[in-house]
Image: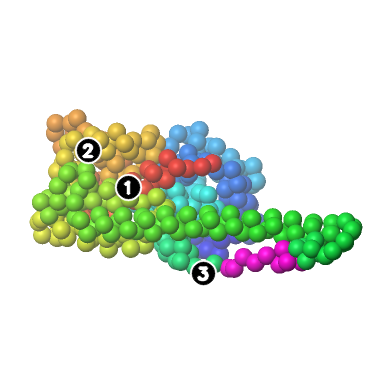
Amino acid sequence: MHKDFNEWFLEAGIQLNENQLNSRWAGIVKISDNISKEDVINLVKIFYSIPISEDLTDRYAKTFVEIDATFSRKNKRELSILAGATLAHIAGTDADHCSFIELLVRAALFGNRAPALSSIYTTIEQIMLDDMILIRESSDETQESIEDSQSKELLALLNTPDIPWGPNISQTLAQYVQSADKIFAKLKKRVDEMEKSAGIHFEDSQLLWWLTGGYSKDLQCAYNNLEKSTACLVVGKEAAELVDNFPGPSSIEGVLMRMIENCKEPNMNIDFVDVVSAINIEWKAQYIKTYSTPGLTDLLPISAALAYSENTKLTSEWVHKYTIEAHVTANEIKCLPYQYALQMFFEVLAHKCYSNYEE
């Protein structure tokens, strides 16, 4: 059980006895043992109080009812806390699912959209930050040496003149084969680690060359020719497309800030609606074509706004519909350009992580 599990409920104004806590945690473990990427998406939606179908909500609640018959399916507040706790548990214990959960929980937070409990969000965010640091640090770790202690013994025995094939040779040969198996396993692990490390170093060099060049591949021009309002989403997307090791580098915020500084206009808050309206039409269409996944896009505020704003003549048309359906009040959002870039970075990474998801 997570050390803060009871505290999360108390913070939400829900008091549970020890048996109830144990049964709730048993339900979380059961859900975590058989999780899919669609389940992750639905859990994040529940955590952010974004409506999903009653069938999906009932299926999630059923797990807890089966363990504790007194559990109420109608308690939406408790369900949202349990969804967040489930996400935190998986993010902290399951290497196969953690990055997608971390990126999706982070990318879903935008504007006035808020999670069910900020302390659960903070827990998941900290896990993501730790993973960002660890993936870079582990690539530079000193590797243990690989030694073969059986070869000399076997060769000495085989080179002994006129020695008959007997138990000693058979036993030594068997020990050698066992030792060789262990060595091959270590070699495979070492090669895998070296490939991963090389990939990370290549990724970092690509980001540095992109930052040094200050050139937009998508728009085919230098960033210093673009205004911040026009460039910020492009900056986030292009950076994310250079990253394949999830959840990305811990230094990415600084990288995006430096690239945004190349652009024209003062560094000041910009209305979200103005950012979406300022984006290049062809670029928007290509983005929607590349990063459009039913169910997932609903959770990603900027991606959803681009989709809502396509093929609309009046800004008010998409803003009204977006505010109602995406649960983000578009007209109230003002952010610095690098914050839009960072948000776009995490949204594109979430899309990429979804596409690479192995279940």
**147 over 55 or under it: above or below:** below
Secondary element at tag 2: helix
Q: Give neighbour class at mark 3: few <14, some 14-19, many 20+ (Cα, 10 Å).
A: few
Question: Residue 284's mark?
Answer: 2
Percent of width and height locating residue 207: 30, 56
Mark 3 touches mark 1? (CB < 8 Å): no
Q: Specify the quadrant of the image occupied by residue 330.
A: top left
Q: Amino acid at mark 1?
A: Glu
Q: Which residue is mark 1?
A: 241
Between 329 and 351, the one lying in front of the other is 351
Q: Amino acid at mark 3?
A: Thr
Q: Residue at x 17, y 36 (%)?
A: 281
The magenta stretch is 144-153
Between 7 and 253, the one lying in front of the other is 253
Q: Earlier in the sequence, mark 1 or mark 2?
A: 1
Within the magenta stretch, is there residue 147?
yes
Q: Specify the quadrant of the image occupied by residue 248.
A: bottom left
Q: Residue at x 26, y 57 (%)?
A: 209
Percent of width and height locating residue 42: 46, 41
Q: Which residue is mark 3?
A: 142
**Marks 3 and 1: which is nearer the front?**
3
Within the magenta stretch, is there residue 314?
no
- Structural distance between the alpha carbons of marks 3 and 1: 30 Å
